[in-house]
Image: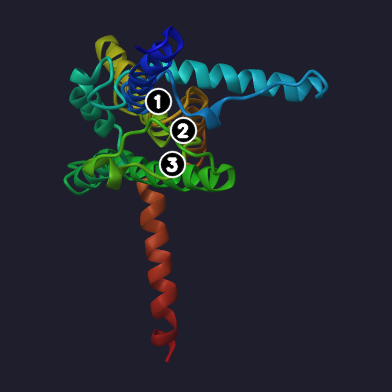
Amino acid sequence: MSSPSSRRNSGRGPVGGYRSTSECHVRRRSSSCSHVSSGAQGEELSVSLSEPIFTITLRLLLAIDLWLSKRLRVCACEKSPWGSVRPVVRLVEFSGHVAPWFIGTVYALLRGETAAEQEIMLDLALALLLDLLLVRVVKTLVRRRRPAQNHSDILSTFLVERYSFPSGHATRAAMCARFLLAQLVDTASMRVLVIGWAALVSLSQLLLARHYVTDVGFGLAMGYCQYSLVDRFWVTWDFLQDLLFTLQGLRWTPYGKQ
């Protein structure tokens, strides 16, 4: 006949094994992308009161940025809270990619019926190239990694860049929206549609966990300022023709003299 202590000790084995198994199961579930709020432990920030006030303020702002970004990642993958609408959000994201914009701009430039239409499309193409250059420079300098919950699939593997700051979709949406509002859109309903599109494209980067909130915010400000640069150095069709004639003259003049 076993003692009460031995019965207690013998009863701990199955319970402990069940507990360890359940803990492993919980850890595996918490590591999935559906539990976005758990996040990666490497993103958490600690604040020390002995640091300068500027450093403390910066860390607090980054902590707020990480917290808000995690709350908005509701379409990070199929198992996310809003995973069912992920295909629609990805379609909105693709509408702000540089590929359809540049291809459509070049097509409109070649099929333009008037010199004014071709001039607008030419400057839009130059603006898209400028956006790619500036975003790539800033991303290379900052080198901020993308959120850990970013779920790469077959399409996003080729369309999503490596670094996060700033959001290229946000810069492009803000710049193209301001370009369209200034050059092509002249009705109130179309203005609302363009602004709404730019807002949805920027929001899609947060819902899909592509970027942090600060990436999108800085990208919108950067894109808004980029159009000011495009408008300041606007390339007219006459200027382009004169430039081409000048380059052609410099090329053929030495042979003509001979």
Name the one closer to the observer, 77 or 215.
77
Residue type pointed to by label 3: Asp
Please state if 180 lies on the left or on the right of 142 as rendered: left
Q: Is residue 203 visible?
A: no
As helix, strand or loop, the secondary structure at mark 1 comes to helix
Query: Which image quadrant is residue 155 in?
Result: top left
Name the one closer to the observer, 12 or 183.
12
Q: Would you call the spot at circle 2 few (<14 residues within 10 Å), some (14-19), or many (20 or more)?
A: many
Residue type pointed to by label 2: Tyr
Please state if 112 lies on the left or on the right of 253 as rendered: left
Name the one closer to the observer, 36 or 147.
36
Residue 131 marker: 3
Q: Is the C-beta separation of discs 2 and 1 under 8 Å?
A: yes
Mark 2 and mark 1: Cα distance apart in space: 7 Å
Q: Return the residue at label 1.
A: 178
Q: Residue furthest front?
A: 1
Pointer 1 or 3: first along the chain = 3
Query: Which image quadrant is residue 49 in?
Result: top right
Residue at x 43%, y 87% (from the top left corner): 257
Q: Return the residue at label 2.
A: 227
Mark 3 and mark 2: Cα distance apart in space: 9 Å
Residue type pointed to by label 1: Arg
Question: The C terminus lies in which quarter of the figure?
Answer: bottom left
Q: Would you call the spot at circle 1 few (<14 residues within 10 Å), some (14-19), or many (20 or more)?
A: many
Please state if 172 lies on the left or on the right of 102 as rendered: right
Q: Position of residue 94 (x, y in %)?
A: 25, 34
Residue at x 39%, y 20% (from the top left corner): 16
Question: Taking 250 as reference, is 102 above or below it?
Answer: above
Question: The N terminus lies in which quarter of the figure?
Answer: top left
Pointer 2 or 1: first along the chain = 1
